[in-house]
Image (tube, rainbow, N blue to C red):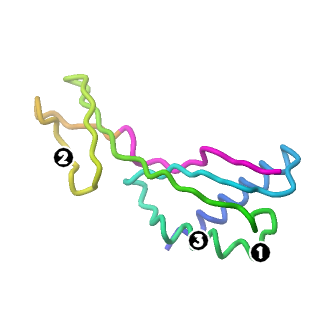
Amino acid sequence: MHEGAIAESIVDILKDTAKENKLNKITKVALKIGKMSGVMIDALLFALDALRNEESIIEDAKFEVVENDIKAHCFVCDKDFYFEELTDIVLVCPDCSMPLEIIEGKEMEIIEIEGE
């Protein structure tokens, strides 16, 4: 379970951001997590919730997760293909049968931080 380490890294970023922006506490954090990131969202939120007791800067923070679909591109056809579920992914272009490259869906990033 690497979500605990990811949660700690997120909190470190939040602490640095709060310090840089002279915030006393973080009230909202929005995360974008790709469906191919390998992150279990429930486990990550559980780990972040557990860190509230250790890090007063996030004790009232609301964490929101936007789960990003998977986007693949065929560089031969110059077409994009979208997949909502991991089981839907095909690794070759449906039009030309050349390999697709995954260009979205592996990311994990903080997209919004609010504080006071």
Q: In the rendered image, which residue does mark 1 sit on?
A: 54
Foreground label between 2 and 1: 1
Q: Is residue 91 left or right of residue 68?
A: left
Crowd class of label 3 (few under 14; some 14 to 19; many from 20; radius 10 Å): some
> Of callouts 2 and 1, which one flags the residue occurring earlier in the amino acid sequence?
1
Labelled disc at residue 90: 2
Q: Tell me, for residue 4, which label it has, or none.
A: 3
Q: Does the magenta stretch include residue 111?
A: yes
- Marks 2 and 3, how far apart at CA: 31 Å
Question: How far across and down, in percent of the image, does residue 109 sit?
Answer: 56, 48
SS class, disc 2:
loop
* Left or right placement of residue 95 versus residue 28 in this view: left
Please state which amino acid type lies under the numbered disc 3: Gly
Quick check: is 21 in the magenta stretch? no
Marks 2 & 3, CB-CB < 8 Å contact: no
Residue segment shown in magenta: 103-116
Residue at the location (78% across, 51% down)?
115
